[in-house]
Amino acid sequence: MDNTVTIHRDWWPSPAKLNLFLHILGKYDNGYHQLESLFQMLDYGDRLAFETNETGDIAMALPMAGVKDEDNLIIRAAKLLAAHSKCNKGAKITIDKRLPMGGGIGGGSSNAATTLVALNTLWDTQLSVDELATLGLQLGADVPIFVRGETAFAGGVGERITSAPQPEQWFLVATPNVHISTAEVFSAADLPRNTPSMRWENYNFEKTRNDCQQLVANRYPEVAKLLQWLVHYAPSRMTGTGASVFAVFCDQASANDVQAKLPASTKSFVAKGVNRSPLLQKLEEQHSMYATSDTN
Ligand SMILES: C[C@](O)(CO)[C@H](O)COP(=O)(O)OP(=O)(O)OC[C@H]1O[C@@H](n2ccc(N)nc2=O)[C@H](O)[C@@H]1O
Ligand SMILES: Nc1ncnc2c1ncn2[C@@H]1O[C@H](COP(=O)(O)OP(=O)(O)OP(=O)(O)O)[C@@H](O)[C@H]1O
């Protein structure tokens, strides 16, 4: 057996997203919902590092608190890529987890996408972005958007993606201390499911909403309280199915000022909205590195 281990010392970013709006248009026969949403990529998130091997072993370097390896979207993504591309290589994966779990900011989906994109490079499996996005959809509705890495409008269950660059804005993202299950929100009888389809070009924050917000605010007073507080300072909304909420600012200093006023017990971060995710930027750096070494 080949016991070669290759340590890649660099970190691969696994950024967060916000749903600047989230409209529910209906429900498909398979139980999933037809959505329209503007996914804003952020310059803040988790980081992953990969130590590849020739034995085929795939595992976390340290188990992630509260998530068994076999359920971890990182491990599931690595195994899916290995199986799909008939690759015999493995990886020991380290995560620097900064995003709250179940926060509506895409933590697990983004981790899965970063794993697919990074290992596709490190294992040299050479799948196209389209193939990686299709594979990712098996792991979660939000994985394709993170694979593509652009701020974008999404339709369908989230997989019909159109790049939609937005003006640069800053966001204060705050997460109340409650865990909200996405499946629970989508199975609620009183969830609105009849928002008309919208033309992307007509997007305007004030004229859109998050169709899950009212229901979540009713069930989780902590979310309602935080939104009521934030909205005094800036336009604010819930992201995904919660629990995180965000406020929009023109500059970093204004976002920092409001963050400083939050109770110390409320988890929060300030991030810049970006049109190309840090993962995409990392991938471009890698490719230009290979291109440079090819010509040397
Ligand atoms: C609502 C969003 O947070 C918006 O970003 C996402 O689309 C949810 O994406 P996700 O967490 O990756 O979702 P998945 O893991 O695929 O699905 C979790 C659960 O949410 C429900 N679900 C999710 C996405 C969708 N378009 N319709 C749904 O009904 C399904 O009941 C599913 O069992
Ligand atoms: N690598 C991972 N990171 C975070 N959660 C994971 C991971 N793998 C599996 N999970 C599971 O997924 C659940 C949802 O976590 P996640 O952080 O993805 O939610 P989210 O931010 O609400 O995502 P989304 O916005 O896509 O709905 C967690 O409670 C956890 O059990």
Image (tube, grey):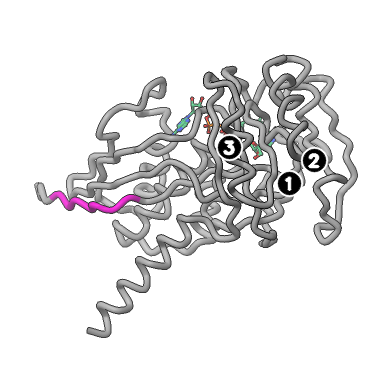
Nearer the observer, 73 or 163: 163
Residue 118 falls in image quadrant:
bottom left
Alpha-carbon neighbours of circle 3 within 10 Å: few (<14), some, or many (≥20)? many
Three-letter code for the amino acid on which mark 3 is drawn: Ile
Q: Please say if 100 is above or below 129.
A: above
**Distance between mark 3 and mark 1 Cα atoms:** 13 Å
Q: Earlier in the sequence, mark 3 or mark 1?
A: 1
Q: Please say if 69 is above or below 89.
A: above
* Mark 1 vs 2: CB contact within 8 A: yes
Residue 190 falls in image quadrant:
top right
Q: Is mark 3 within 8 Å of ligand 2?
A: yes
Rendered residue at 57%/18% (across/down): 177
**Distance between mark 2 and mark 3 Cα atoms:** 16 Å
Instruction: Name the residue beneath numbered marker 2.
Output: 23
Instruction: Name the residue beneath numbered marker 3.
Output: 105
The kind of secondary structure element at disc 2 is strand
Specify the segment rendered in magenta: 5-11
Q: Please say if 124 is above or below 212.
A: below
47 relative position to 152: left or right: left
Is residue 137 in the magenta section?
no
For discs 3 and 1, the disc positioned in front in the rendered view = 3
Q: Earlier in the sequence, mark 2 or mark 3?
A: 2
